[in-house]
Each structure stands twice: as structure tokens, then as C-alpha cells.
Amino acid sequence: MKSIIKTILTITMISQMSFLSISALAAETKPTEKIKIDIVSDVVCPWCAIGFKRLSVAISELKLENQVEISWHPFELNPEMPREGQNADKYLMNKYNLSEEKLKQTRNNMTQLGKETGFKFDYFKEMKKVNTFNSHILLAYAKEFDKQTELKVRLQNAYFGERKDVSNREVLEEEVKAVGLNTQEAMKRLDDPKAIKAVEDEEKFWRDQGVYAIPTVIFNNQIAQVGASETKTYKEILTELSKKR
């Protein structure tokens, strides 16, 4: 990320929801009339998908579609995941010490939550946890053409709802093509040392700022929500920021 924002981060826990208060000390970005929304997330994060659905509803209900500027930033839930991935059930049960029954219950709850928010979760036995680094490279590329959100949503839907492996280059190329981007140019970025380093540097930047959980949604470099907040909460923040413009 070109803009360097030096921040002081204070974390407060309120009613089991983490609120990240960011005091911006300096920024290279120029002031804009639009509300700037930075979202740190991963393609394979279910709560990121839910959170964005809720945020989208808030934006729509307040009729702010043309008054917000959304930027996506990389965060890998499983940065050490091998390219071939791992069986999702086994991985999650080992990582969180879950029983098969507990994992099933958790996924049923997430599937129901998805239905309530309009997002499809289609969990299946052969589902894999995959490496998402290449998807973040392509999302950075898509940003250059104002296609970042469109590609992000497609990748989330592909992984959770269409049983696609979003670490697979053919799948990534299909999704890039679907949003109208130059596939040849985009896929070259996956092997471009500069593009690779740019994503690595941005991941490090957010870790250095104290971002430890996703989604983290930052509004105007001032206030951030950690976790998938309710639509009501997003509306309150957006309403307050709209008054200050």
C-alpha cells in the first residue's frame, strides 16, 4: 500500500464485540468527500462474508452507494497453508480441538446465519482449506480498475457457495474474466516479484498496526470494527460520519 498511515490502536471489548479505535497521526491520502472504508479480510473467512453482507445492507438502506469508497486489504487466516491445501474438517478439528459433532453444529449455525443475511454456505465433506495468497495479488490488481469489490465477492461466493478451489489458477482466471479484467495481464501478476512483495508488505503493515482478527473494517482512518458487526452498528457509524462530511 502506497499510503503510509501511522496509527495508535486502542482495543476495547464491549458486549463481546471488539472495537478498534484508530487515531490517525499522518496520512498521505488527500481528503475526500466520500466515506473511506478499508476492509482487512481473507477470501476464505466466513465471518468476513457475513460482515460485508451486513455492511452492504447498511450502505444500501442509507442510500450511500455512491458516497463510500471501499478498499480491500490482505490478511491470510492460514498463511502457512500448502498450495495443495488440507481437508477443511480435519484442519479445523485439529486446530480448534473440535469434535466432529461440534464442527457440524458450528457449520449448521453458520449456514443458517448465511441464509438470514443472503449469503450461501455450502459446506461439503471434501472441502479444503486453501492458500489464498494469489487471490490477494489479484484483488490488488483488480483495485487498479475499480473491480476489487466485485472480484472479492465472486471469490467468496466461489469458495463458500460453488465448491471451487480459490487457490487453483484456472479458477482464479475464470473469476478474473467474469469481472471483465484482462486475464493474461492479471495472471502474470502471480509470478511478478513486485506484486508478490507488495502483498507481503501490506500484510505486514496491517499486522504492525495491531490488526489481529478479521474482518476489521476501518472508517475514515478513525474508527474500526473488529468482527462481523450487526447492520445496525454499521448504520450508526455511517450516519455519524455522513453528518461530519
Image (cartoon, helix red, strand yellow):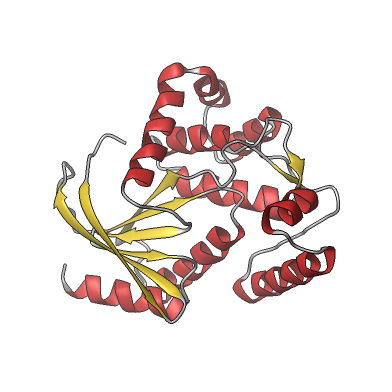
Residue at 19% over, 75% down: 243
Q: Quadrant of the C terminus?
A: bottom left
Count the numbered circles shown. Answer: 0
* Left or right position of 52 against 91: left
The correct choice, above or below, for 40 with respect to 117 in the image is above
Q: Residue furthest right?
A: 125
* Rendering coords of residue 156 (x, y %): 61, 51
**Front one among 28 and 9:** 9
Q: Quadrant of residue 169 in the image?
A: top right
The correct choice, above or below, for 168 with respect to 29 in the image is above
Residue at 77% over, 64% down: 103
Q: Quadrant of the N terminus?
A: top left
* Left or right position of 200 against 124: left
**Front one among 66 and 164:** 164
* Rendering coords of residue 137 (x, y %): 49, 32
The correct choice, above or below, for 159 with respect to 218 in the image is above
* Rendering coords of residue 229 (x, y %): 46, 72
* Left or right position of 101 against 118: right
Residue at 57% over, 60% down: 49
* Rendering coords of residue 16 (x, y %): 47, 77
Residue at 83% over, 69% down: 101
Q: Quadrant of residue 39 in the image?
A: bottom left
Q: Residue furthest front?
A: 97
